Image: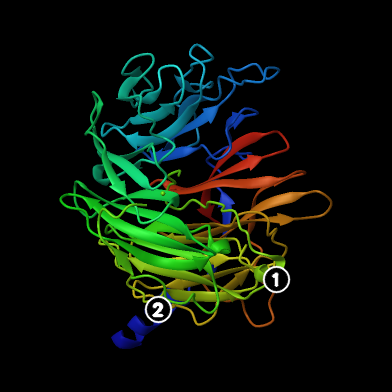
Amino acid sequence: MTLAAALAAALLARTAGAFTAVAPDPAWPAAGVTVAVQTYGRGSLHTIPDGDGGLILAWQDARGLDPASCNCRSMDDLYAQRLDAKGTKRWGADDLAVCKWRGIWGGSDFLVGLYPDGAGGAVVAWDHADGPAGTFARRVTRDGTMTWGAEGSTVFEHELGLKFTARSARLGREVWLGLDAAEETRVRISPCVLSTRAMNCDPPQEFALPAQFQTVSILAGPSPGACLLVFTTRTGAGGICWAWPVGAGAPGEARRLLEADEAGFPVQLQPDGEGGVWAAAVVRAPPPAAGPPASVPAGTPLPPPFAGPGLTFSGQSARSAADAALPCDLRVQHGDAAGRPLWGPGVTVAAVASPATPFAIAASPRGDLAVGWMDAGDPAHIRVRFFDRAGLPRTPQPIVLADRAERTRPIGLLATPQGWIVTWTEWEAGATESLRAAWLTGAGAAPPGGAEPPRGSVVLRRNDAVMLERLVSTPGGAFVFAFDRSVKALLAFRLRAD
């Protein structure tokens, strides 16, 4: 074989790829690692790599409260744990209680973020909304020693942080913290620097947005002192996803990335690694008619809560049943660090039958983008398409997998150095439900002609609902967190190609 032929064959193999079975890592407990039970606050999990093949976790947990009480004034406490490369808990079997108000002051604690401290440990930040209201932080060293005082250090007094989201940036040292604002047309953010001694934040900067916002994310910018605000707004029967670079000098302009009808929300985001962002949403087909200019001057007045990249947010829809039956497109857009849309009106991934289509996006370090979805017109299957950085599809047709997918459950999609992991939930006989995963290498591959779509491997099977909580990729491996409703437990699995 000539060198040219060998290179062509290698390129074809990388582009076509293959399905690979996924299985829980046998080095971990077969039933997974129980992170929290009964009192775990769904959706509150934060994770970062521990630098040695494992993970550091933080979450909200009501284990210290009397389940017979109404807990009207004291909600979840905050706990943390470190799982090493073998799934062993390194910070004690009962976890570390980072914040345990337990009604001393009353009020509610909300986990704001989890950040590397630069020395193998982590900084946990939270918002307390009553009593000594404000934003607080506490550092946990690599060996599980908690510092910065028994009640944490005060980051902001009387300033609430975690209704909005903080996003850790380069080297894990710079953080942008969103703060509560008096008006829903304004955003207040503060650049912070983490050290082993404190979390130091500058006075908040306030930005007036072009309309009342629904969701906001803060992404790290291309240089220190810069970030990108990505937010969604309502405009009558429609909605807009905007991007606005701020910090590091005078703010730029808020630019429109995607426009959708009202049911086109939620929008999913994925940082591109260069200060920009991919945004995906379901939009009515054909695209909405042109509206106001594509950008608004900096400082123009605008919207509540912040939300992190990659998460899905539900919006209220006032559409009639007839409107809900209108054809839609699943569309994705790429915005650069200046918030400029790079893919025209957006790239159409597929036509879908419902605006309530579950979908997920993920990006690889080399700039490829994967989009997975489940169409209401064919709820038994998962479809995945791959795009390069220019928005060109890597496969002419979607990759089809799954057999009896449950369309009311979210799809999980994760980029890893070895390929892409797709997860979904399936109903089985009786009330049995399973969380399944498939590994797509390269750009994925279609099954042979006439063959049934691959169903993936079972990660967890229970006689009750099994819910995907989070997928995480680190230099130490790929991890899936699932909520087992039969015992009300959050379980962690490390995945490997089988």
Q: Residue furthest left?
A: 249
Q: Quadrant of residue 476?
A: top left
Expressed as whole percent of the image width and height from the top left, the position of residue 483 reads: 63, 41
Q: For mark 1, does the 10 Å Cα neighbourhood hold few (<14), some (14 to 19), or many (20 or more) residues?
A: few
* Residues at marks 2 and 1 touching, judged by CB atoms closer than 8 Å: no
Task: Out of 438 and 137, give the one closest to the viewer.
Answer: 137
Task: Out of 12 and 238, give the one closest to the viewer.
Answer: 238
Q: Is residue 298 left or right of residue 452?
A: left
For the point 38% across and 37% down, the residue is 182
Q: Is residue 225 above or below residue 273?
A: above
**Whole-Å distance between the Cαs marked 2 and 1?**
33 Å
For the point 33% across and 14% down, the residue is 149
Expressed as whole percent of the image width and height from the top left, the position of residue 379 reads: 70, 66
Expressed as whole percent of the image width and height from the top left, the position of residue 150 reads: 38, 13
Snapshot colouring: rainbow
Q: Is residue 406 visible?
A: yes
Expressed as whole percent of the image width and height from the top left, the position of residue 349 reads: 50, 74
For the point 34% across and 44% down, the residue is 187
**In front of the other: label 2 or label 1?**
1
Tag 1: amino acid: Ala
Q: Which mark is residue 18?
A: none
Task: Out of 430 and 469, give the one closest to the viewer.
Answer: 469
Q: Is residue 48 above or below residue 227?
A: above
Tag 2: amino acid: Leu
Q: Which mark is residue 322?
A: 1
Residue at image mark 2 = 392
Q: Is residue 382 above or below residue 91?
A: below
Q: Is residue 219 above or below residue 332?
A: above
For the point 62% across and 79% down, the residue is 448
Badge 2 or badge 1: first in the primary sequence: 1
